[in-house]
Image (cartoon, grey):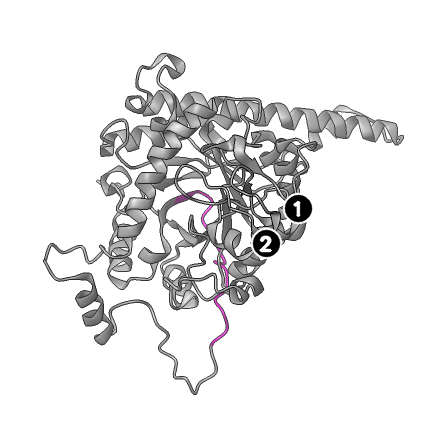
């Protein structure tokens, strides 16, 4: 299984990294030969470039934006990098997308694969170690831009894949035991993409990411999405050495403990987590620590990345799963939803049993009152594929993914998030229906 993860993850990350490097420098959306530097210089001169505050330096800064007072019940989001979010021409593109499609939410990179934060964060370690790229020059203006259009704003944090914090705090990072002769000069372990990771068992790492999330919420974000909440899955994993993890505690327990710690420290906030798509159908932790039941208990939304291109050839009988988006996604979400229902039943039974043990009368009315409103479990809200891998993803194929999500989840349908590393989306797949 880890070989399959490695195979698909490598292809996908290469695609992501290539696109991310170009995303912030290619969204003028006009085919001319002017260099990006010249374009940005021109738009900055005309106040059309990277978002900046219009408030005079002599004026006190306005208070940070508030969360949306009436957030949508069903989230239909697109992913955007920090670099894209910081460029006015790309925001103009998004404005058109919002006006012509069902998209009502965005997922903005706060900390991406580089480990750098996309805006000037108030988190202590970001300042101390200069871990920001300031792709977004004015985070409050960005949030207001979206909220003024009634767009729900989600901040995405890549957690344990973090080259920035690994270099700043090598004593908390996974190191390469084959290349490290002296523990005082550890050589950081790297995955197949040359990226280093922090130790998932480190409470200091947990606190660092929570400090980022708290600052994001301070700036009016409606939700924080946690990604790469797992152990590494590719590279020479046999060479990994962990400064904190004792290897006696299972990977699953480490990740579950982190889930619980997040919820305990952000008790009243909207939280979501990204999981490998195969967590929907696999009952073990797949060697990375992720088990979907653990996530159901600690988040508002669980987002399996059910990209059909990321399933191994032969999955549910398809030679190329990418060519069968409806079947692959419906099958995966059907199983995930059933597992959630089983977990709910187990928790209901345990609550009734505990009530009986305490001397409270157990009855049908008690069982009827123990429902999802009492036992909080996350809603399923998957990531869907809007990029070409394994097949050319047309508007119809993206629509099939959305339909599979709706058909599987039924009354539990709470939306979806579209991923395209280029940040340009298939608008025909989500266009608003015109009334006859």
Give the x, y percent position of residue 325. 33, 25
**For residue 210, which numbered disc appears in the image?**
2
Give the x, y percent position of residue 290. 56, 32
**What segment carries the magenta color?**
62-76
Q: CA distance from mark 1 to mark 2?
A: 9 Å
SS of the residue under disc 2: helix
Q: Is residue 304 visible?
A: yes
Q: Nearer the viewer, residue 402 or 155?
A: 155
The residue shown at (38%, 68%) is 137
* In this picture, residue 430 sits left or right of residue 238: left
| Circle 1 residue | 261
Q: Crowding at label 1, few (<14), some or many (≥20) Cα neighbours within 10 Å?
A: some
The residue shown at (24%, 61%) is 89
The answer to whether mark 1 and mark 2 are in CB contact below 8 A is yes
The residue shown at (23%, 39%) is 428
Q: How many marks?
A: 2
* In this picture, residue 57 sits left or right of residue 197: left
State which quarter of the image contains the C terminus: top left
In magenta stretch: residue 55: no
Give the x, y percent position of residue 108. 40, 53
The image shows residue 159, relative to residue 86, as above or below, that is: above
């Amino acid at each position: 299984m880890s070989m399959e993860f490695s195979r698909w993850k490598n292809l996908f990350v290469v695609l992501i990294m290539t696109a991310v490097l170009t995303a912030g420098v290619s969204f003028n959306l006009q085919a001319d030969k002017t260099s990006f530097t010249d374009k940005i210089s021109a738009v900055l001169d005309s106040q059309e470039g990277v978002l900046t505050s219009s408030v005079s330096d002599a004026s006190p800064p306005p208070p940070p934006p508030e969360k949306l007072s009436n957030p949508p019940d069903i989230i239909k989001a697109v992913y955007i990098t920090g670099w894209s979010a910081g460029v006015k021409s790309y925001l103009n593109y998004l404005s058109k997308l919002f006006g012509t499609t069902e998209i009502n939410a965005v997922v903005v990179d706060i900390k991406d694969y580089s480990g750098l934060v996309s805006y000037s964060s108030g988190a202590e370690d970001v300042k101390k170690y200069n871990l920001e790229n300031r792709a977004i020059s004015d985070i409050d203006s960005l949030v207001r831009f979206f909220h003024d259009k009634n767009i729900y704003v989600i901040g995405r944090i890549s957690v344990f894949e973090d080259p920035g914090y690994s270099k700043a705090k090598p004593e908390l990072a996974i190191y390469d035991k084959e290349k490290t002769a002296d523990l005082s000069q550890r050589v950081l372990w790297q995955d197949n993409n040359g990226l280093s990771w922090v130790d998932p068992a480190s409470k200091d790492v947990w606190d660092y990411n929570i400090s980022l999330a708290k600052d994001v919420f301070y700036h009016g974000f409606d939700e924080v999405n946690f990604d790469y909440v797992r152990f590494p899955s590719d590279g020479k994993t046999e060479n990994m050495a962990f400064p904190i993890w004792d290897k006696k505690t299972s990977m699953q327990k480490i990740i579950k403990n982190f889930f619980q710690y997040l919820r305990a420290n952000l008790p009243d906030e909207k939280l979501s987590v990204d999981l490998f798509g195969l967590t929907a159908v696999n009952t073990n932790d797949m060697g990375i620590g992720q088990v979907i039941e653990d996530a159901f208990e600690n988040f508002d939304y669980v987002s399996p990345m059910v990209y059909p291109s990321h399933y191994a050839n032969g999955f549910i009988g398809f030679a190329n799963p990418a060519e069968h988006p409806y079947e692959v996604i419906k099958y995966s979400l059907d199983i995930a939803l059933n597992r959630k229902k089983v977990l709910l039943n187990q928790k209901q039974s345990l609550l009734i049993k505990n009530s009986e043990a305490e001397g409270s009368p157990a009855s049908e009315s008690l069982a009827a009152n123990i429902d999802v409103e009492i036992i909080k479990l996350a809603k399923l809200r998957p990531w869907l594929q809007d990029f070409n891998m394994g097949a050319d993803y047309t508007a119809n194929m993206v629509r099939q993914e959305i339909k599979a999500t709706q058909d599987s989840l039924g009354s539990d349908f709470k939306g979806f998030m579209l991923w395209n590393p280029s940040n340009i989306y298939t608008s025909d797949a989500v266009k608003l229906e015109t009334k006859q």
